[in-house]
Amino acid sequence: MDKKKVAVPLVCHGHSRPVVDLFYSPITPDGFFLISASKDSTPMLRNGETGDWIGTFEGHKGAVWSCCLDTNALRAASASADFTAKLWDALTGDVLHSFDHKHIVRTCSFSEDTNFLLTGGFEKILRIFDLNRPDASPREIEHSPGSIRTVVWLHSDQTILSSCSDSGGVRLWDVRSGKMVHTLETKSSVTSAEVSKDGRYITTADGSSVKFWDANHFGLVKSYDMPCNVESASLEPKFGDKFIAGGEDMWIRLFDFNTGEEIGCNKGHHGPVHCVRFSPGGESYASGSEDGTIRIWQTGSLNPKEKESSVPNGPSKPMTSDEVGTKLEDLKLGGSN
């Protein structure tokens, strides 16, 4: 496949400090949305298609390291260096609740059913807040081996995935028991983790490597060496035939999922790229950088024949709740701690 022609991105200004996290909502009746976290302490909400600014969430007193939207894009959440995670009304920008922590909160994630908010950070504790009872004490899962960098829900909220800032590997936790059931081994610290739209793959970035793991059986499916240290990677959600990665060389590269061949390289940022994410339909992707900007790039479509023939991430029967439970029991019996 030939290299892509030079792409001209939509450039989104507004943040005064580095952009460190991006999150796309699913497609809603009102379209889809993009929220960004920045060291300037003010998460911003944008139209995911056009990049147009919708609003700014004001209230944090320190850098915001992580942000997310719930399934309907009606609420937002953010994790901050001010020792709090906040829940926001995404329509009005009002703070609905502030969850106090005892140290920097590095990451947050809504459960798939939107009833819970998961947080992690320098305290090395995973906390699960019940959003229907926000004043209640959170459930705590301890024994993380280090400061928590990323968290993701999977298996219909039965499993939590977490990585640490100061050690390699991704830990998988059984939500019901609170026990760690498996570790995905990596040499370097995992700075980005994402579950594919169809639930089949976990995409991780660690050091100069992007890896794809089987989200149900936890085996390593593919591992590709990158040209530089990458901080973030994202798998195209519709066909699963390509992925993006961005890192210290300031470029966002597009790769073929099956071969690892570089099929595009987008230049434009003036600082290291901290986060990359595909839009929910895969027609575009966004990057956030040390330079304080967000850039939205058009993916560029394969021709129809290629689309039909390249669906490694296509129709697949997801595991049922019972199958997931059995798999987790097997992992426990196997003694993977």
Image (tube, rainbow, N blue to C red):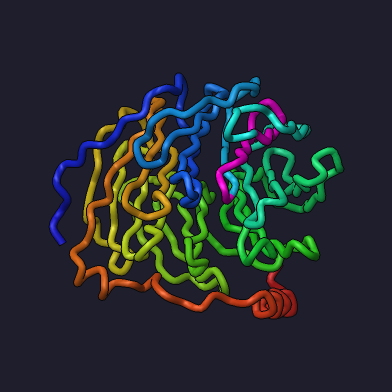
Q: Residue at x 73, y 48 (%)?
A: 126
As drawn, 81 above or below 304:
above
Q: Position of residue 222 (x, y in %)?
A: 40, 68
Q: Position of residue 139 (x, y in %)?
A: 82, 50
Magenta run includes residue 221: no
Can residue 183 be seen here? The reply is yes
**Nearer-the-camera pick, 277 or 188:** 277
Can residue 166 be seen here? The reply is no
Q: Position of residue 189 (x, y in %)?
A: 54, 49
Q: Position of residue 174 (x, y in %)?
A: 72, 65
Q: Residue at x 74, y 61 (%)?
A: 175
**Nearer-the-camera pick, 78 or 248:** 78
Residue at the front extreme, as displayed:
29
The residue stretch that appears in magenta = 71-88
Q: In which quadrant is the N terminus drawn? A: bottom left
Q: Residue at x 54, y 75 (%)?
A: 318
**Nearer-the-camera pick, 46 or 222:** 46
- Main SS class of the magenta portion in the image: strand
**Nearer-the-camera pick, 266 or 114:** 114
Left or right of 225: which side holds 156? right
Q: In which quadrant is the C terminus drawn? A: bottom right
As drawn, 166 above or below 3:
above
As drawn, 277 above or below 171:
above
Magenta run includes residue 85: yes
Residue at the right extreme, as displayed:
136
Q: Which image quadrant is residue 321 in?
A: bottom right
User: In this figure, what is the number of numbered marks?
Assistant: 0
Q: Residue at x 78, y 64 (%)?
A: 176
